[in-house]
Image (tube, grey):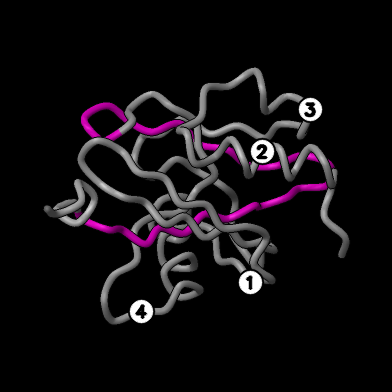
Amino acid sequence: MRKRSENKPHLQVTAGLVWDGPKILITRRPPGIHMEGFWEFPGGKKEHEENLEQCLRRELMEELGLEVKVREQFARAIHEYEDRIVDLYVFNCDIVSGRATGKESQEIRWVRPEELNKYCFPPPDAAIIKKILGQGRRKD
């Protein structure tokens, strides 16, 4: 008998913890996509020809107009949805150039870590938020 999860697409997804002083950037998923209306740390799906860092740099430029330096991996979370498995890789990022703008009409906010629990995030982000709250602002 096959396991349920063997029939599901397995997606590698990156997300960036982009800081501006004590605040972190979050974006709201636009209508018409999976988990629409939920808040998230910006990023996206990895394409076959790129590594995780390239994926995150591309996604942050396409979605927000930000050129970033991808730093160390902060966390990893795997979550199985009814129709897919998401392997989420989260990295600390520094802004090299640009100003965060919702290029895909998504809402963006800069929030303090203690405010993250006021927003509704997808399930894989729960462990990430817990780790952020436990560690506070990343060390430079």
Secondary element type, mark 2: helix
Marks 2/4: CA–CA distance:
27 Å
Could you say where residue 109 lies in the image, as x and y percent from the top left? 60, 32
Residue at mark 4 = 50
Q: Earlier in the sequence, mark 3 or mark 2?
A: 3
Secondary element type, mark 1: strand
Q: Residues within 10 Å of mark 1 (few under 14, many from 20)?
A: some
Which SS does the magenta portion mostly show?
strand
Disc marking residue 69: 1
The reply, left or right, for residue 77 in relation to residue 5 is: right
Q: Earlier in the sequence, mark 1 or mark 3?
A: 1
Looking at the rendered structure, the kind of residue marked 2 is Ile
In-front residue for pair 111/139: 139
Looking at the rendered structure, the kind of residue marked 1 is Lys
Marks 1/2: CA–CA distance:
21 Å
Q: Nearer the viewer, mark 3 or mark 2?
A: 2
Disc marking residue 57: none
Q: Nearer the viewer, mark 1 or mark 3?
A: 3
Q: Nearer the viewer, mark 1 or mark 4?
A: 4
Measured along the vertical axis of the image, is residue 31 above or below residue 135?
A: above
Q: Nearer the viewer, mark 2 or mark 4?
A: 2
